Image (spheres, rainbow, N blue to C red):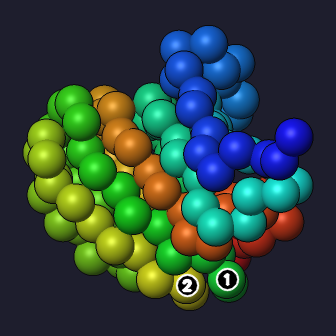
Amino acid sequence: MSEKNYMIEQMESISPVQCPCGSTRRAFVSPENQVATLHLVDIKADSEVHYHKKLTEIYLILEGEGHMELDGELIPVKPMSAILIKPGCRHRAVGKLKIINMPVPAFDPNDEWMD
């Protein structure tokens, strides 16, 4: 039998893990998937500025209002704000937010950098 051409995840059944932004549930994390992953993130009050050398991230704000700190600039965000974060951009979310984060290529824990 051949491998399926799709993957399905139930976000609520994925155990959350801690990350520089807060608490995240990461979908589609597997060795055979190098394309992209999908993260449901609850932003913590003291999220840490970080960057990635290889990953591009797309954030979609689902709940809350706050700011994105992008290379030192504070940008106001609200539900349905979408942000594309290129490699090398120092960033963090600020405020009580729930977001979707889509790293491209697939998330690599070895590509999280702090200054």
Q: Are marks 1 and 2 in contact (CB under 8 Å)?
A: yes
How many numbered circles does the render carry? 2
**Which amino acid is tagged 2?**
Pro
Q: Which residue is depicted at the point 73% across and 66% down?
A: 34
Q: Is residue 90 visible?
A: no
**Residue furthest to the front:** 1
Task: Tell me the quarter of the image containing the C terminus.
Answer: bottom right
Q: Which residue is depicted at the point 46% across and 83% down?
A: 86
In the figure, 74 relative to 21: above or below?
below
Q: What is the x, y in percent for residue 41?
A: 48, 36
- Give the alpha-carbon distance from disc 1 to disc 2, as whole Å: 6 Å
Q: What is the x, y in percent for residue 93?
A: 38, 52
Helix, strand or loop at label 2? It is: loop
Residue 54, label in figure: 1
For disc 1, the neighbor class at 10 Å (few under 14, some 14 to 19, many from 20) is some
Q: Quadrant of residue 114?
A: bottom right
Q: What is the x, y in percent for residue 90?
A: 50, 76
Q: Residue beneath label 2, please? A: 87
In the figure, 11 relative to 94: above or below?
above
| Residue 72 as seen in the image, left or right of residue 86 | left
Q: Quadrant of residue 52?
A: bottom right
Helix, strand or loop at label 1? It is: loop
